[in-house]
Image (cartoon, rainbow, N blue to C red):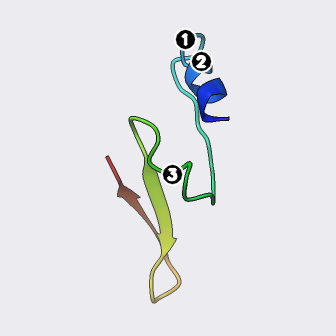
Amino acid sequence: MIQMLRSLGERFPQIIAISHISDVQGQFDNTFLVAEDDMGNSRVESLT
């Protein structure tokens, strides 16, 4: 799946993938983590 998404990068300037699989997370140049804080609010953190 990761290789397929990388090959699509040649045709499309932006590809968004959402995954709960830890092996997929962090495999791309720009990776963001969306997590819930103690108050129930969502926060976004850049992992790159």
Task: Quickly name the residue at label 1.
Answer: 10
The amino acid on which the numbered mark 3 sits, given as a three-letter code, is Gln
Q: Mark 1: few, some, or many residues within 10 Å (few <14, many ≥20)?
A: few
Quarter that holds the N terminus: top right
Q: Label 3 near label 1: C-beta < 8 Å?
A: no
In this rendering, the answer to whether 36 lies above or below 38 is: above
- Mark 3 surroundings within 10 Å by alpha-carbon count, few (fewer than 14), some (14 through 19), many (20 or more): some
Q: Nearer the viewer, residue 38 or 27?
A: 27
Residue visible at 35% across and 53% down in the picture: 47
Q: Secondary structure at mark 3?
A: loop
Q: Residue at x 45, y 81 (%)?
A: 37
Q: Are marks 1 and 2 in contact (CB under 8 Å)?
A: yes
Q: Disc 2 marks which amino acid?
A: Ser
Where in the figure is residue 16, as x and y percent of width and height?
Answer: 59, 37
The residue indicated by pointer 2 is 7
Q: Earlier in the sequence, mark 3 or mark 2?
A: 2
Residue at label 3?
Answer: 25
Q: Under tag 2, what secondary structure?
A: helix
Q: Amino acid at mark 1?
A: Glu
Q: Which is nearer the N-term, disc 1 or disc 3? A: 1
